[in-house]
Image (cartoon, helix red, strand yellow):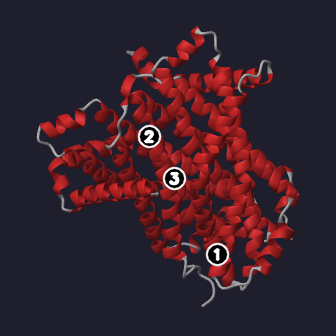
Amino acid sequence: MTAAVASFGEIAKFCGRVLGDVYRLRVLRFFGEALRQAGILILGSTIVIWGLVFIIGLQCGIEGAYFTRAQGAPSYAGVFSAWCDLRELVPYAFGYMMSAKVGTGIVAELGSMRISDEIDALEVMGIDSVLFLCATRLLAAWIVLPFMYVAAIGAGFFASYLAVVQQIGEVSSGGFFLIFWMFQNPPDLAFSVIKAMSMATVIVLVGCYYGYHASGGPVGVGRATAKSMVANIVGVHLVGMLGTQLFWGANPRAPIGG
Amino acid sequence: MVRGTADRVFLPTKNLLEEVGDMMILTGKTLVSAVRPPYPYGGEFVSQFMFTLRLCWMPLLVSTVAVSYGAPGLQAANFLILFGALDRLGGFFVLATIREFAPFVCAIIVAGVAGTAITADLGARKIREELDALQVLGVDPIKNLVVPRFLALMICTGLFDAFAIVFGITGGVIATLVNGAPLGPFWATFFTNADVTDLWGSVLKCTLFGAITAVVCCYKGMTASGGAEGVGRAVNQAVVITFLGVFAFNYVFTQTLLATHPEITVIR
């Protein structure tokens, strides 16, 4: 128990340092490295993340279509799709794939740098290794991910449309979109982006912590990667719940009633 | 020139197809050597089962309560309150928790926690050349390492589904209490809508998720290569492939179940 609290404190201290580096704009000293990391993020992870969100969108679509059909209102499948995609499952799918692809990738990369003593070499050369390795990655994530996430929402919407209108086919395209757009508005989108960005921040920070502090040879890197995944999964679910409670808990934000 | 371009375009596809084929072969070999005597994997099976159980129960508990309190609990309760029909939340939870969230949170947790640990473990043995040593000693790594992990993960994920459902419904109960509504109507609509088909569908789905996770993670661990970064990269790829595979399978399975059993979609 003491060990758990102590390691949580270590993580918090490390995260505070990385966030401070980005917030005080010290990270701009290595802006080129941040842009390079952003490029790696775009080329390496975009397609997989969109792919998973697309599959989740299909899932939302069929569940919504069958559920509203059972209620005797198949033309209202748009309500279910809009809420399920935008508010809940697209952020979760994004978080899952971020932790699987980006989070564990960072741990594997930084961990192998640590055990082959490259991080110590950086320190010897007089470069602040936390700033150069971790803060640049966080900045890169903040530059790229909002755009990638908004496009991912688009992929989810498209998949729901395919599932509800083209596959199940109990509502016309016009009827679906009328209800679909009526039950969401720009603040909802902004809340969804905030939720996903909080998840992404947690994932990048956790990945950096476990990679930076890896030890015990190649085996240790593998074990650190596996351990970071546990922290990420729990973190994603907790951020998702808190976001829902904060943004939609007291106000359903639906165009019904007074 | 043309050949170079063609290689660049088709080589990744070819590698991907080869990998999928290899995983299928590994699945086949695992199933065959699981049923063919002798059965030396009993002890390893028990220890892997306990390992999965010990590693996963806490993240699973936290995650299922969080997900079902947030996603179906709060959002659906808000929607139903607009119509003054909060008692229908129980009926919605049959769809939300039993059919969807419990199996998929289970799969995510088992893949992310136990699956990654298995890949890291097997990958470490691979790059320390312990797997080759086993083969030299005449010990079949598939029978002694993969089969117990496959069976343990499969059965464990299936059984975890029951826990996920229980704690998922706890999330719904919390959402009802937060809205200051009595619990009687929640349970009434829940039990009138609950269906045995839903339950076995959920458990079967979860068991197959476990099987997918086990095969992908064992395969990636046993083929890890490339020195220091190799094991980390193997874990990374294993968890990405598992997530994509699990969700794609989830879509096909749910669609088939809903289309072939129309009685479970009827609201009672």
Number of callouts in the render? Answer: 3
Quadrant placement of the C terminus of chain A? bottom right
Name the quadrant containing residue A168: bottom right
Q: Nearer the viewer, residue B26 or A55?
A: B26
- Residue type indicated by callout 1: Ala
Query: Which residue is tagged 1?
Result: B175
The amino acid on which the numbered mark 2 sits, given as a three-letter code, is: Thr
Residue at x-position 78% and y-position 18%: B38
Question: What's the residue at 68%, 42% (across, down)?
Answer: B209
As helix, strand or loop, the secondary structure at mark 1 comes to: helix
User: Label 3, label 1: how many angstroms apart (C-alpha)?
Assistant: 22 Å
Indicate which label's residue lies in the foreground, 2 or 1.
Answer: 2
Q: Is residue B191 above or below residue B204?
A: below
Locate residue A98, reporting x and y percent: 46, 49
The circle on residue A233 is 3
For the residues labelled 3 and 2, the Cα–Cα distance comes to 13 Å
Residue B255 at x, y percent in the picture: 75, 50
Q: Where A187 sits versus A239, above or below? A: below
- State which chain disc 2 sits on: A
**Residue reaching furthest to the front:** A2
> Quadrant of residue B147 in the image?
top right
What's the residue type where badge 3 is placed? Ile
> Which chain is home to disc 3?
A
**A19 displayed left or right of B51:** left
Q: Secondary structure at mark 2?
A: helix
Residue toward you, B267 or B135: B135
* Labels 3 and 2 within one chain: yes
The disc at residue A225 is 2
Report whether mark 2 lies on the same chain as mark 1.
no
- Chain name for mark 1: B
Between B23 and B151, the residue placed more toward the observer is B151
Between marks 2 and 1, how big is the CA–CA gap? 34 Å
